[in-house]
Amino acid sequence: MDELEKMLLMQIADLHKIPDGAYNIRKNGEADGRRSTKHIVISPREDGKPGIDIRIAPHTKNESVHIPVVITKTEYRETVYNDFYVGEGADVLIIAGCGIHNCGQQTAEHSGVHTFHIGKNAKVRYVEKHYADGDGNGEKVMNPRTVISLEEGALLDMETTQIKGVDSTVRETVAKLAGGAQLVVREKIYTHGKQFAATDFSVELDGEGAGADVVSRSVAAGESVQEFRSKITGNAACHGHTECDAIIMDRGKVTAVPSLAANSVDAELIHEAAIGKIAGEQIIKLMTLGLTEQQAEEQIIKGFLS
Amino acid sequence: MLELSHIGFSVPTENGREKVILDDLSLKIEERFVAITGPNGSGKSTLAKLIAGILSPTEGKIFFNGEDITGLSVTERARRGISFAFQQPVRFKGITVKDLLSLATGRKSTVSEACEYLSEVGLCARDYIGREVNASLSGGELKRIEIATVLARGTALSVFDEPEAGIDLWSFQNLISVFEKMYRRTRGSIVIISHQERILRIADKIAVVVNGKIDRAGTREEILPSLIGANACAMLTKTKEA
Ligand SMILES: Nc1ncnc2c1ncn2[C@@H]1O[C@H](COP(=O)(O)OP(=O)(O)OP(=O)(O)O)[C@@H](O)[C@H]1O
Ligand SMILES: [Mg+2]
C-alpha cells in the first residue's frame, strides 16, 4: 500500500494497518486483500456481478468485518454489490467506507449497493464513512444504496458520515422490519463548495413492535445543495421517528421532505424537520469566551456533527 | 477597572422614531463586588451587553483599564479580561459541558479541573461533565453551568446577569460563597445584576438603574436602606432565611 492509499484507509476506516478479523479491501476495482475467519466467510459473488458475499454464522459474537473501498484513479466508474447474510443471534460490527482520491480532470465514481439480510435477534452495528479529496478538477461521486431486511427481533444500528470532499452523492436506504426489529440510523453530512448531497430513506415497519429512529444532521455551507427525504410506513403496532436537523451557511440550500404513512391505528409515527442558520446567540456566547466569530462557528458545527 | 462614560443606547422603532433605552449613563466599577439593581425593563441587561460588547452604545465611551474599548468586538473584550454570564444562557446541540469549560479556559481542561468548577456551582461533576448543553438540561442546571464558564475564565472583570434566577433557596448561600471564592482567586471586579436583597448585602457598591439612568449609586450603607425601607419600590425580592 502506498501513502495515499494508507491515508484514505485511515479516513474511512480508522485503519492504520491490516485489521483484525475478517476484511476485504477493494482498490481500483481489484481485490487488494481478503481474509475470512471461522465464522465470517467472504467470497466472490456467484452471479458474476462485481462485489462479494459476506456470510456471518449464527451466534457469532464480538467479531468485526472491514470492507473498505479505495479509488485513486481518474475517469473511473464502478458499481459494486455486497450482500451480507447475518445469522440468527449474531452480534457483529461491520465497517464499510469509500475513499476517493482523484487528482485528474475526469470523474471518479463509486456506487455501492449493500444488501443486509439480518437474521432473528441478530445485532449489527454498521459504520459507513465517505471521504474524498484530490487536487484536480475531477468530480468525486458516490452513490451508496443500502437495502435492509430485519427479521424478528433483529437490530441494525447504522452510522453514516460524509464530511466534505464528495462532490455529488445520492444515497438511498430502504428497510423492511419484521416484528420487534429495530433500526437506528444516524446520518451526518457536511457539504461545501458546489457539492450536492441527496439522501432518501424509506422504511416499512411491518411487524408488531417494530421500531425505526432515523436522524439526519447536516450542514450545507458554500453554495452546496442538499435534499433530505424520508418515508416511514407503519403497517402494524410500531414506533417510527424521523428527524432532519440542518444548519445552512453562506448560500447553502437544504430541502427536507419527511413523510409518514400509517396503515394501522396502532402505528405511532413522528417526524421533525428543522433548517436554519447557526443561532446568533450561540456565536456570541462563544465569542464572550474569547473565540473569534469563525472559531465559534467551527466549534458549533463540530459539536453539531459530533 | 471599568468606566462607562455618558452612555446612550437607543433603538429605532417601527414608526421611524427612536426608543431610548439608556440615557447619559455614567458609572465606575473598581470595587470587589458591584451590584446593579432596578425595576424590570430599566436597562440592566442592556448595560451588561454593552460592557461585553454584544451591543454598541449609540453615544458615550467605555474604558477598561484606561483603554477605550468602545469600538472593540466581543472577542477582543473577552481576551482583555471581560466575562459575561447571560441572564438566559444559550443551549448548544452536541457541545458538552466539558467542551464548553475547555473553550472557557482556552485550553483542553482536564476532567478534574472541569469537575472543580462544576462542584463549585453545586453540580455533581460526574453526572454533568459529558452532558450536552442542550434542551435536556433544566433551567437551573443550565444557569449553574453558565456561571461555571465564567468561573473557569477567572478574568479581571466578570458580569453576572441575575445569577440567582432559577437557583433554589438552599443553594443561595453557596452562590454567595462562589463569588467570594472567585474574588479570592482572581482579585477581579465582580458585577452582579440582581433583585435579591441577600446579594445586595454583600455588595461594596450598589448602583440603581431606573428608566435607563443611574438613579443613585454608592456604598451598600448609603444605598441599601433606601431600597429596603418602608417606601422602597417593589424592585427587590426578599428571600426568607433558608
Ligand atoms: N432591541 C430592542 N428593541 C426594542 N426594545 C428593546 C430592545 N432591547 C431591549 N429593549 C427594551 O429595553 C428595556 C430594557 O431592557 P433590559 O433587558 O435591559 O431590562 P432589564 O433591566 O435587564 O430588565 P429585567 O429586570 O426584566 O431583566 C426594556 O423595556 C426592553 O423591552
Ligand atoms: Mg435583564
Image (spheres, rainbow, N blue to C red):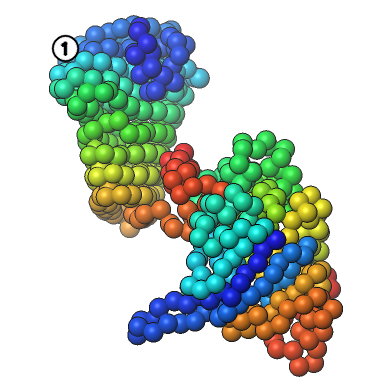
Q: Nearer the viewer, residue B24 or A129?
A: B24
Ligand 1 within 8 Å, label 1 CB: no
Q: Position of residue A188 (x, y in %)?
A: 37, 39
Q: Nearer the viewer, residue A116 or B196?
A: B196
Q: Position of residue B181 (x, y in %)?
A: 81, 54
Q: Quadrant of the N terminus of chain A?
A: top left
Position above or below: A219 against A155: below
Would residue B85 be seen by someone viewing this image from the given angle?
no
Tell me what residue is drawn at x 30 percent, y 30 percent. Answer: A165
Q: Amino acid at mark 1?
A: Gly
The number of discs equals 1
Question: Which residue has dot 1 on it?
Answer: A48
Q: Secondary structure at mark 1?
A: loop
Q: Position of residue A216 (x, y in %)?
A: 36, 44
Looking at this view, name the residue that lies furthest to the bottom: B231
Tell me what residue is drawn at x 40 percent, y 33 percent. Answer: A159
Q: In which chain is the residue bearing label 1?
A: A
Position above or below: B123 against A21: below
Position above or below: B136 against A68: below
Tell me what residue is drawn at x 65 percent, y 38 percent. Answer: B109
Check disc 1: other Cα within 10 Å, few if <14, some if 14-19, many if 20+: few
Q: Nearer the viewer, residue B77 or B141?
A: B77
Q: Position of residue B239 (x, y in %)?
A: 78, 76
Tell me what residue is drawn at x 38 percent, y 13 percent. Answer: A6
| Relative horizontal placement of residue B217, taking residue A137 as reference (left or right) | right
